C-alpha cells in the first residue's frame, strides 16, 4: 500500500478523524493466489539455498530454462520437487544438469541404480516435474511403506493401484491383493503380470482359520485364537455378547478339545497332530436348539463351504504366500461374508509376517481396495504400525478419507488424495493436508479441491513435503 491507495479523486479540504481498514476476509483473485504461491515457494528456495543447496559451477548459472529467477545455482525445481507448486519450470527443459558435488547425498538417479531401488511413477506436477514413490530410498527414507489412496468413484484410484501392483511385480516382490471388485482378478491384468488368482467364492479360503500358528518359541495358547476369531464374527454379524458370542466361543473351544487340544494351556505346535475346522464347529452348534439364532446369522459362512479342513489344503500358508496372489472376493454373496473372510486372512498374514525377518525394506505388498470393509481390523492396524520393520507395505484404497480410522491412516506415510464431491469429505482432506479447515491456506486449498479434475489430486510423504498437486498417469496409458 502507498499514498495513492487512499487519496480521494478530488480536492479535499475537510479533516479525517477516522480511517478504517478492512483486513478480513480478503478478496483475492486467482492471479493473487498464484503470486502468493510463487512468493512462498521462492522463500523456501532461498532458505534451501542458504542452508542446503549446492551452488552451480561458474558459467552454469540458470541453465535450467526456468522463467523465474529462483536462485543462481542448482535449480530448486529439480532438486526439491515438493516446491514445484510455485515454480514456472517449462515442460521442455534441458536435460543437462549441474554436476553433483562430491560430498552431497546421492541423487534420485544414483539411488535408482542400487539393487534395492524401487521407483513407481505416480504422475507429474502442473510444471511437468516427476512425482514418484520411492519406498526404499536410503538417502530420504519413508516412515513406513504404507500408501493411502482416497477419492470418489471414477477419480482414478483403481488406475493408480493397478500401476503400483504392476511396478512392484516387475521388481519380483510378492503382492497379495484383496480384490472386492474384480479389478486385479480380471484375466487380462492378472495374466499380463503373472499373478495367480484364487477364486474364494468357488474354492473357499486357501487355509483353515482354526489351524494354530505358534509364536517365536513355536508355542501357542489356543484360547487366544478362539477369542479373536469369535470377536471378529461378533463385530461383523452383530452377535449378542452374552449369548450368541459366548456360545460361539464355547463351540470353537469344544471343537479343539475334541482333537485333544486344551485351549487354555500353552503347548508346542509340533505336538499338535490335528486341528478342527468350521464344519465341526457348525455341527456342535447344531446340537443345541438354543443356537438357532446364531446359526441363522452365520449360515452364509457355514453353508457355502468356504472353510477347508487341514486335510483339504494342498499347500501350507507359508508356501501360498511365497508368490503373488489375487484373492478374488467379488463373487461372494454379501459384504459381511467378504469382511469376515478378509479379516480371517489378515489375522493369518499378521501371524505369518511376525515370524519372519526384519529387513526394513519393502519385501511384500498387501493391497486393499474398498478398504472400508476391513477398516476395523486390529491386526491390519498393527500391520500398518509394524510393517516397515518386517518389510511389509499396505496399499489402502477407499472413496472417503473419513472411512479410515486415524490409527490406520496415520501409519500410511504416503497419501494420494484425489477428488471428492462431498464438502464433508473435502474437510477431511483439508485436515490431512494443512491440519485445519479455517484460515487463508485452508480456504485457498478448499477452492482448489473443488476444481480437481479426473486423475488429479494431492500427493504427500516425507519426500514431498508438505504436498504437491499431481496429475496421475493412469495404468491404461502406461500399459497399452
Image (spheres, rainbow, N blue to C red):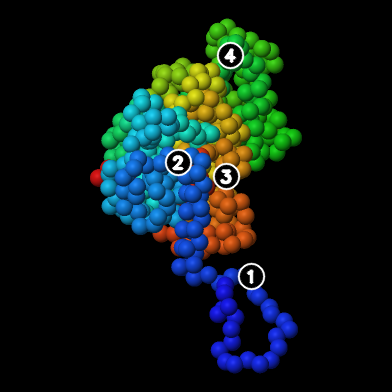
Q: Which circle's residue, 1 or 4, is located before the other in the chain?
A: 1
Relative to the observer, which residue lies in front, 291 or 21?
Answer: 21
Q: CA distance from mark 3 to mark 4?
A: 31 Å
Q: Which residue corresponds to the image point at 55% horizontal and 21% vertical from the top-left?
A: 354
Dot 3: within a 10 Å radius of its alpha carbon, few (fewer than 14), some, or many (20 or more) residues? many
| Secondary element at image label 3 | loop
SS class, disc 1 = loop
Distance between the Cα atoms at labels 2 and 1?
Answer: 37 Å
In the picture, the quarter occupied by the C terminus is top left
Residue occupying the point 44% across, 54% down: 85
Residue 324, how many percent across, how many down?
38, 28
Question: Residue at label 4?
Answer: 216
On the image, the x and y values in percent for residue 134 come to 42, 35
Residue holding disc 1: 24
Tell me, for residue 53, which label it has, or none. Answer: 2
Closer to us: 350 or 449: 449
Q: CA distance from mark 1 to mark 4?
A: 62 Å
Q: Are marks 2 and 1 in contact (CB under 8 Å)?
A: no
Q: CA distance from mark 3 to mark 2?
A: 38 Å
Under circle 4, the secondary element is loop
Amino acid at each position: 500500500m502507498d499514498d495513492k491507495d487512499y487519496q480521494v479523486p478530488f480536492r479535499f479540504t475537510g479533516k479525517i478523524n477516522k480511517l478504517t481498514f478492512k483486513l478480513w476476509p480478503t478478496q483475492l483473485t486467482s492471479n493473487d493466489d498464484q503470486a502468493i504461491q510463487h512468493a512462498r515457494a521462492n522463500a523456501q528456495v532461498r532458505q534451501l539455498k542458504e542452508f542446503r543447496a549446492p551452488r552451480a559451477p561458474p558459467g552454469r548459472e540458470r541453465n535450467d530454462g526456468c522463467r523465474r529467477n529462483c536462485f543462481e545455482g542448482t535449480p530448486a525445481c529439480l532438486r526439491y520437487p515438493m516446491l514445484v507448486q510455485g515454480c514456472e519450470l517449462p515442460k521442455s527443459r534441458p536435460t543437462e544438469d549441474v554436476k553433483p558435488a562430491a560430498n552431497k547425498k546421492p541423487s534420485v538417479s544414483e539411488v535408482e541404480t542400487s539393487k534395492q531401488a524401487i521407483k513407481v511413477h505416480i504422475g507429474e506436477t502442473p510444471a511437468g516435474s516427476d512425482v514418484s514413490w520411492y519406498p526404499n530410498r536410503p538417502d530420504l527414507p519413508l516412515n513406513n511403506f504404507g500408501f493411502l489412496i482416497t477419492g470418489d468413484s471414477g477419480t482414478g484410484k483403481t488406475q493408480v493401484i493397478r500401476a503400483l501392483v504392476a511396478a512392484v511385480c516387475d521388481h519380483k516382490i510378492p503382492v497379495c491383493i484383496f480384490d472386492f471388485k474384480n479389478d486385479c482378478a480380471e484375466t487380462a491384468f492378472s495374466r499380463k503380470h503373472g499373478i495367480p488368482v484364487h477364486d474364494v467364492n468357488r474354492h473357499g479360503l486357501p487355509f483353515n482359520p482354526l489351524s494354530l500358528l505358534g509364536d517365536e518359541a513355536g508355542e501357542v495358547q489356543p484360547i487366544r485364537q478362539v477369542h479373536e476369531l469369535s470377536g471378529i464374527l461378533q463385530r461383523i454379524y452383530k452377535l449378542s455378547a452374552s449369548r450368541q458370542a459366548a456360545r460361539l466361543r464355547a463351540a470353537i473351544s469344544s471343537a479343539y478339545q475334541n482333537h485333544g487340544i486344551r485351549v487354555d494351556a500353552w503347548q508346542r505346535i509340533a505336538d499338535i497332530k490335528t486341528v478342527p475346522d468350521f464344519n465341526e464347529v457348525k455341527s456342535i452348534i447344531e446340537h443345541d436348539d438354543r443356537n438357532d439364532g446364531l446359526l441363522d446369522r452365520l449360515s452364509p459362512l457355514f453353508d457355502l463351504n468356504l472353510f477347508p479342513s487341514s486335510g483339504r489344503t494342498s499347500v501350507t500358508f507359508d508356501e501360498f504366500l511365497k508368490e503373488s496372489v489375487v484373492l478374488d472376493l467379488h463373487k461372494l454373496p454379501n459384504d459381511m461374508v467378504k469382511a469376515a473372510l478378509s479379516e480371517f486372512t489378515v489375522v493369518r498374514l499378521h501371524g505369518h509376517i511376525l515370524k519372519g525377518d526384519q529387513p526394513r525394506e519393502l519385501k511384500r505388498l498387501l493391497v486393499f481396495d474398498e478398504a472400508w470393509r476391513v477398516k476395523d481390523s486390529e491386526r491390519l492396524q498393527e500391520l500398518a504400525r509394524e510393517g516397515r520393520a518386517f518389510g511389509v507395505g499396505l496399499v489402502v484404497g477407499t472413496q472417503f478419507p473419513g472411512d479410515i480410522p486415524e490409527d490406520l491412516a496415520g501409519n500410511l506415510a504416503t497419501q494420494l488424495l484425489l477428488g471428492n464431491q462431498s464438502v464433508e469429505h473435502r474437510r477431511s482432506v483439508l485436515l490431512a493436508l494443512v491440519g485445519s479447515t479455517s484460515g487463508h491456506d485452508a480456504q485457498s486449498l478448499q477452492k482448489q479441491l473443488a476444481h480437481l479434475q479426473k486423475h488429479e489430486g494431492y500427493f504427500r510423504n516425507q519426500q514431498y513435503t508438505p504436498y504437491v498437486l499431481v496429475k496421475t498417469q493412469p495404468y491404461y496409458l502406461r500399459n497399452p
